[in-house]
Amino acid sequence: MSARTQDEIVARVRAVADRDLFGFRTEVLIMALDYRHVREFVADDPADDGWGAADAETVEREAREYYAFALGKIEGHRGISARRSVEKLTEFAWLLGRDDIVSAMEAADYEQYGAPKVKEFGVGLGLEWPSTEAMTRMAAGEPCRPDCDEGCER
């Protein structure tokens, strides 16, 4: 079980629905729902014997793995993928009961493919931020390099 109750997760899915155009947030949230609660949100009825709610350990493991994926999207100047990463990491933090991380991510600017927001997630979970000059600059909301033509300056 995650740090949130089934009813809290259902309420969160409903609350984010209007700003979850591509379902990235919902995708993370429903993994922590049990069979009885998830049925409302999936088009294909999952098999009762094949669906299980992710526990807190699984949620945290997947969050950490997704953080590494998100770093690659930032470094690669991948706009939509980086936006997806920010949305999913926000919901991972929420599932873990880390409202402090959610607040820090919400307060951080989005510039440079969400790098400041993703860094807040990593800091909150004690994860290392890449020490390259480009990622240091991007986390500060600056272009990866002054003459970047990959999107930082646009």
Image (spheres, rainbow, N blue to C red):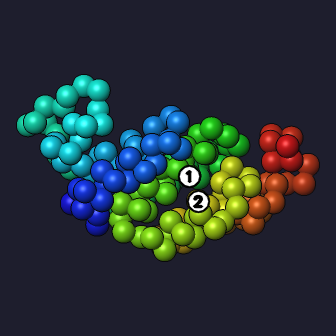
Where in the figure is residue 25, as x and y percent of width and height?
Answer: 45, 46
Q: Is residue 117 left or right of residue 144?
A: left
Label 1, on which residue? 86
Foreground residue, 113 or 129? 113
> Which amino acid does the dot numbered 2 rest on?
Val
**Residue 81 in view here:** yes
Q: Secondary structure at mark 1?
A: helix
Q: Is residue 42 left or right of residue 130?
A: left
Disc 2 crowd rating (10 Å Cα; few below 14, some 14-19, many 20+) is: many
Q: Are marks 2 and 1 in contact (CB under 8 Å)?
A: yes
For marks 2 and 1, the one nearer the N-term is 1
Q: Quadrant location of the C terminus? A: top right
Where in the figure is residue 130, as x and y percent of width and height?
Answer: 62, 62
Foreground residue, 59 or 38? 38
Label 2, on which residue? 118
Q: Residue at left 75%, top 66%?
A: 140
Is residue 119 positioned above or below 53 on the image? below
